[in-house]
Amino acid sequence: MRAILVKKFGPVASHAIAEMPDPVPGPGEVLVDVHTIGLNLPDSLMVQGKYQKRPEPPFVPGRDAAGVVAAVGAGVTRCRPGDRVLAQAFTGAFAERLVAPEQRCFVLADAMDFADAAALITTFNTAYMACVVRGNVQPGETALVTGAAGGVGLVAVQLLKAKGARVLAAVSSPEKAELALANGADGIVETSADDLKASFRAQVERLTDAAEGRGVDLAIDVVGGDVFEACLRVLKFAGRLVVVGFSSGHIPAAKTNYLLYNNLAVIGAPLDINFEKAPANIEASVAEMQALYGQGKLNANIMRQFPLEEFKEAFRVIESRTVRGKIVLTTGRNDAA
């Protein structure tokens, strides 16, 4: 099979596609003939050795894949050969065949195609942990999403709307604002102003109800840095700020006296640890993802698809931070299966 092989950590351009033996599923494992692969910014960090978890080279990177089960190992019960599945592995997805643990494989509903499935799995699961499990969004609340034109941000906007929230989308350009509005955002907060904190607060105050208290009940932050600090200052009494990531590259710090005085909560929302500590959260998330997709309430917003051999160009687009939505790789298998 063909696979992207990381022999040693380095820039994406330093890696190449290699011919490798087909993997064989062991007990509790599933072998998937991969049709589509979802790309995420952490994938770029992982091949460079900059991700918080570092597999030992050589390894095949990639976490999100969709395809058809080719074989299963002993003890597997949740899927069988021929099933259309979605896999969210830790590594191995950037290949024509993937072996994944059974608990990280999910049978796809007939309505969901492979490209959308691979594009959505990490973004939706991340958004679900942030908005539902950790953020505990309630109908009628006002929520703010930063980086709202990116993969996680767009899904968070859609999910929060489905949960009955009013959603403000924080974005850095008119083009991104248009995309966020098309995905259900009720208002736009522009983040490109020089005096971000003052501008951010003024915009949120204009967009929120004085009778109910200016500000938001919940903020979902994927950006970090100055945007995180701006989010803190637009929370209502007892507001929650959920930390998802730091796409800005800057990890912020919160002054705890400010949290205490204003009765605020800053909450971490990791994804992968749920597979180990709270697998029921993952099961609930995937079930909701497929339900919302089937109801037409969830759009993967695939910006572009690249064949596997053009992975370097696909990553270049990811690293340029110009992506609006998702990038997907294809292996050339029949995508309609």
Image (cartoon, rainbow, N blue to C red):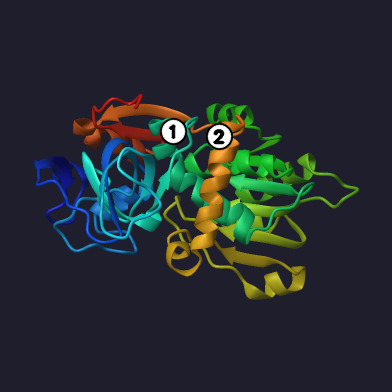
Q: Residue at x 69, y 57 (%)?
A: 233
Q: Which residue is mark 1?
A: 116
| 168 left or right, relative to 93 | right
Q: Position of residue 169 (x, y in %)?
A: 63, 40
Q: Which mark is residue 293?
A: 2
In this rendered view, identify the residue nearer to me: 206 or 194. Answer: 206
Q: Give the residue at x 35% y 34%.
A: 328
Mark before the other along the chain sequence, 2 or 1: 1
| CA separation in Å, label 2 and label 1 | 9 Å
Circle 2 — which element? helix
Q: Quadrant of residue 119?
A: top left
Return the residue nearer the eye: 95 or 169.
95
- Do residues under tags 2 and 1 come within 8 Å of each other at their CB atoms? yes
Q: In the image, residue 269 lies at what x, y percent?
A: 54, 61
Neighbourhood count class around disc 2 (C-alpha, 10 Å): few under 14, some 14–19, many 20 upward = some
Q: Secondary structure at mark 1?
A: helix
Residue drawn at the location 30% of the way across and 42% of the way down: 81
